[in-house]
Image: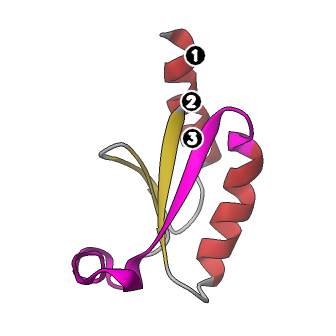
Amino acid sequence: MREFVVYSRRGCHLCEIMLEELEPLCRGRARIQVRDIDTREEWIKSFGKVVPVLYSGEEEICRFHLERQAVLDEMSRDESS
């Protein structure tokens, strides 16, 4: 099952919105892991104020706002394999 990783920050309104929109798309099709960037110095350096950022593996899917079609396209790769 595909896993998406959302790099986020506590209290980030855009992060909350991305997760609210992502969860129904992934239900039963993919897992979501949320990583609070403030818990690791390297994440703070990598992302700074650029959150949320959605990854699938090493590939950045979108940042700031969920790109629904990009997520669906990424999940369809699994289904066509």
The front one of 31 and 9 is 31
Asked if disc 1 and disc 2 are in contact, CB closer than 8 Å, the reply is yes
Quadrant assignment for the N terminus: top right
The front one of 45 and 66 is 45
> To which residue does mark 3 refer?
71
The coloring applied to the image is secondary structure
Task: Report helix, strand or loop for mark 2.
Answer: helix
- Are there few (<14), some (14-19), or many (20+) residues within 10 Å of tag 1? few
Asked if residue 80 is positioned above or below residue 1 in the image, the reply reads above
| Percent coordinates x, y for residue 3 in the rendering | 50, 42
Disc 3 from disc 2: Cα separation: 6 Å
Part of the protein shown in magenta: 25-49
Amino acid type indicated by mark 2: Met
Disc 1 from disc 3: Cα separation: 13 Å
Comparing marks 1 and 3, which lies closer to the viewer? 1
Task: Report helix, strand or loop for mark 3.
Answer: helix
Q: Is residue 49 visible?
A: no
Amino acid type indicated by mark 1: Glu
> To which residue does mark 1 refer?
79
Asked if disc 3 and disc 2 are in contact, CB closer than 8 Å, the reply is yes
The image quadrant that residue 27 belongs to is top right
The image quadrant that residue 75 belongs to is top right
- Please, which residue is most extreme toward the bottom here? 11
Amino acid type indicated by mark 3: Val
- Are there few (<14), some (14-19), or many (20+) residues within 10 Å of tag 3? some
> To which residue does mark 2 refer?
75
Asked if residue 69 is positioned above or below residue 53 in the image, the reply reads above
- Ranked by sequence position, the earlier of labels 1 and 3 is 3
Q: Residue at x 47, y 55 (%)?
A: 5
Asked if residue 72 is positioned above or below residue 51 in the image, the reply reads above
